[in-house]
Image (cartoon, helix red, strand yellow):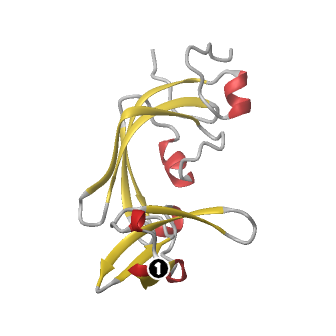
């Protein structure tokens, strides 16, 4: 019996790590994450393309330059101000504050630096501007149900399309 491979309308469960250019693991997911291949999953497109044709048990390493991954760093999304102008609950590196733009859209900014009485917040994703490697282990692959294909989301206990 041949192992089922990742293809459009497959439900795929993966575990993965994201490794920076220095080889440090910056993110790791050891609990399987499921998605529907080709179903607007939220995975980076390059990862979905690279997983195509692979089967459960295989490991795939995908290099993501900024254009294929977390985007370019945009300096205009970083702001520095006197710490006295910032509410005390945000006086630590890593604090997150949500701002709303003129269109009513929320954007999350993180405190990235505090020094010399100044505090810097940055709206870039933490890995923006970096080339990273995603090390993906395929845990399982199966056919998606009609509902899963329509929703793009795996459903526990679903019977596959026939």
Q: Is residue 17 above or below residue 82?
A: above
Q: Quadrant of residue 98?
A: bottom right
- Residue 26 is situated, as x and y percent measured from the top left of the image, at 31, 55
The one of 109 and 141 positioned closer to us in this rendering? 109
**x and y percent of residue 149 in the render?**
69, 30
- Image-based side of 101 in relation to 92, left or right: right
Kindly identify which residue carries mark 1.
Answer: 85
Q: Quadrant of the N terminus?
A: top left
- Of residues 28 and 63, which is closer to you in this image? 28
Quadrant of the image occupied by residue 36: top right
Q: From what the image shows, is residue 27 above or below residue 34?
A: below
Q: Element type at marker 1?
A: helix
Which quadrant would the C terminus be assigned to in this image? Answer: top right
For the point 29% across and 66% down, the residue is: 21
| Furthest residue toward left | 23
Along the horizontal axis of the image, is 81 left or right of 159? left
The percent position of residue 157, horizontal first and vertical second, equals: 56, 14
Q: Is residue 56 left or right of residue 101?
A: left
Q: Position of residue 81 (x, y in %)?
A: 45, 84
Q: Residue at x 47, y 68 (%)?
A: 66
């Amino acid at each position: 019996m041949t192992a089922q491979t990742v293809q459009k309308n497959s439900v795929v469960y993966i575990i993965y790590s994201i490794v920076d250019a220095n080889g440090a693991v910056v993110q790791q997911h050891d609990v399987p994450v499921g998605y529907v291949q080709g179903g607007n999953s939220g995975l980076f497109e390059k990862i979905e393309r690279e997983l195509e044709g692979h089967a459960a048990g295989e490991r795939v390493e995908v290099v993501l330059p900024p254009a294929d991954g977390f985007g370019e760093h945009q300096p205009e999304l970083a702001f520095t101000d006197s710490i006295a102008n910032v509410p005390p609950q945000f006086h630590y590196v890593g604090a997150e504050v949500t701002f709303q733009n003129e269109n009513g859209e929320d954007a999350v900014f993180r405190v990235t630096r505090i020094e010399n009485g100044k505090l810097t917040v940055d709206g870039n994703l933490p890995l923006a501007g970096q080339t990273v490697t995603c090390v993906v282990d395929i845990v399982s692959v199966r056919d998606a149900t009609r509902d899963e294909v329509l929703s793009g989301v795996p459903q526990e206990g679903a019977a596959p399309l026939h």
